[in-house]
Image (cartoon, rainbow, N blue to C red):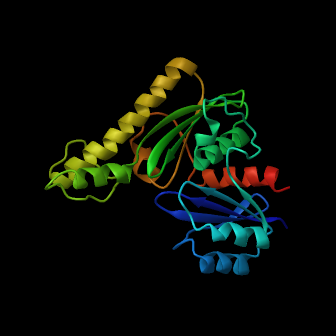
Amino acid sequence: MSTTLCFDFGNTRKKVAFFEKAEIKEAVVLPDDSNETIHSLINRLKPEKSILSSVIDHNPAIEDILSSATRFHKLSHLTRLAFTTPVGKPETIGADRLALASAAVHFYPASHNLVIGMGSCVTYNFINKYHEFVGGSISPGLEMRLKALNYYTAKLPLVKADSNVPLIGYDTATNILSGVVLGLAKEIDGLIEAYRERFRNFNVVLTGGDMVYLASHLKNKIFADPDLIFKGLYAISEVNNP
């Protein structure tokens, strides 16, 4: 049975999913990207293939470790993809956005797709029905917004994200949550409406760790899939690690 490790190294978390064929069997957040951590994963799961999507300066030694123990592929603008990138500088597209676009094309190949990634940043990724990743938007993520209010003011506290948010805050913490969580939800809805004015029919897919705080506050119909980036990485691995 074909087995694959899919690594997603973001600005906030380092995650990995283990696939048997096309099914996720395990997904965890890694404590770090040390040699010992990667060796432990390989020894326990014994994967045949591996793929890495990284938007950080990760431990470079792990690429050698994965190359020696598995059929390894590092996601980049040189990766063979199921879509084209007709933008000015395709080499600047983040690996995470390439993986999300790949998942959209894999699961919804006949549609326009807007994939919204809820991580350290919010990324809006539009892939049309002709399988062209034409770009999108990037804005501060939920945690970044909460931290900014604390960092750039003298007295505002650092508030923990929550999905249970009142429209009218009744103390400092709920005022911040109302502004940040509901404000971000209105941003997402507003951009979806702007896309709808131009493209009319398209899928909206929401993914990422912070989607749990936002999904219930969105008025637009969305598909929510917390594992979308892993599924995209697996699809890419199958093409680049045959």
Point out residue 71 in the picture as x, y percentages from the top left corner: 80, 64
Task: Pick whichever, 240 or 188, lies toward us.
Answer: 240
Point out residue 235 in the picture as x, y percentages from the top left corner: 74, 50
Quadrant of the rendered structure where residue 110 is? top right
Residue 145 higher or lower than 5, as above or below: above
Horizontal relation, residue 67 to residue 210: left or right: right
* Residue at point 46%, 50% (across, down): 211
- The quadrant the N terminus occupies is bottom right
Q: How many marks?
A: 0
- The quadrant the C terminus occupies is bottom right
Point out residue 141 in the picture as x, y percentages from the top left corner: 40, 48
Quadrant of the rendered structure where residue 108 is? top right
Horizontal relation, residue 35 to residue 29: left or right: right
* Residue at point 69%, 28% (across, down): 129
Asked whether residue 166 appears in the rendered view, the answer is: no
Point out residue 37 in the picture as x, y percentages from the top left corner: 60, 77
Task: Pick whichever, 225 or 11, lies toward us.
Answer: 11
